[in-house]
Amino acid sequence: QVQLLESGGGLVQPGGSLRLSCAASGSIFSINLMGWYRQAPGKQRDMVATITSGGATNNADPVKGRFTISRDSAKNTVFLQINSLKPEDTGVYYCRIIHVRDDWGQGTQVTVSS
């Protein structure tokens, strides 16, 4: 019943910026955590940034200072502002929302290349 639709990905040159959005719809209950994860080609999925129900944020070391996670709880939406993109940021970015369930989106592709 829950759909997490990521958007905002695309092909960007190094140094560019993107703003990813994840809109959740359906049977969404009290949200404990919202986050973004990414999976580079041939690698495991890793946490990029999370935000708790209390508003506390956590960013992975490789993206600190460049990525910012935010949310609109009323709209069940989480965002990821990504600046100063590097080729190693390339990957599929997945949205995750933990509420009564643990739901994942299908991902949005981010490709950083000249």
Image (tube, helix red, strand yellow):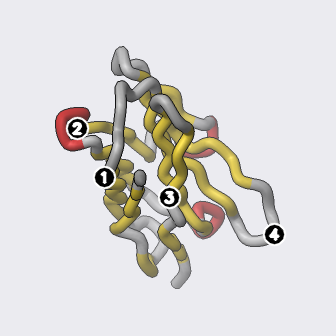
Tell me the residue that label 2 is attached to.
72
- Give the camera-side residue of 65 and 95: 95
Q: Tell me how far mark 4 sits from mark 1, CA to CA.
A: 30 Å
Mark toward the start of the polypeptide (4 vs 3): 4
Q: Name the mark on residue 105.
A: 3
Q: Tell me how far mark 1 sits from mark 2, CA to CA.
A: 13 Å
Front: mark 1 or 2: 1
- The reply to whether the C-beta atoms of the residues labelled 1 and 3 are less than 8 Å apart is no
Front: mark 3 or 2: 3
Vertical relation: 69 (above or below) 8? above
Tell me the residue that label 4 is attached to.
42
Question: Residue flagged by tag 3: what amino acid is it?
Answer: Gly
Left or right of 5, for residue 95:
right
Tell me the residue that label 1 is attached to.
25
Front: mark 4 or 2: 2
Q: Identify the residue at image location x=53%, y=56%.
A: 94
Q: Identify the residue at image location x=20%, y=42%.
A: 75
Q: Would you call the spot at circle 2 few (<14 residues within 10 Å), some (14-19), or many (20 or more)?
A: few
Q: Tell me how far mark 1 sits from mark 3, CA to CA.
A: 11 Å
- The reply to whether the C-beta atoms of the residues labelled 1 and 2 are less than 8 Å apart is no
Circle 3 — which element?
A: loop
Question: Residue flagged by tag 4: what amino acid is it?
Answer: Gly
- Give the camera-side residue of 93 and 16: 93
Circle 1 — which element?
A: strand
Mark toward the start of the polypeptide (3 vs 2): 2
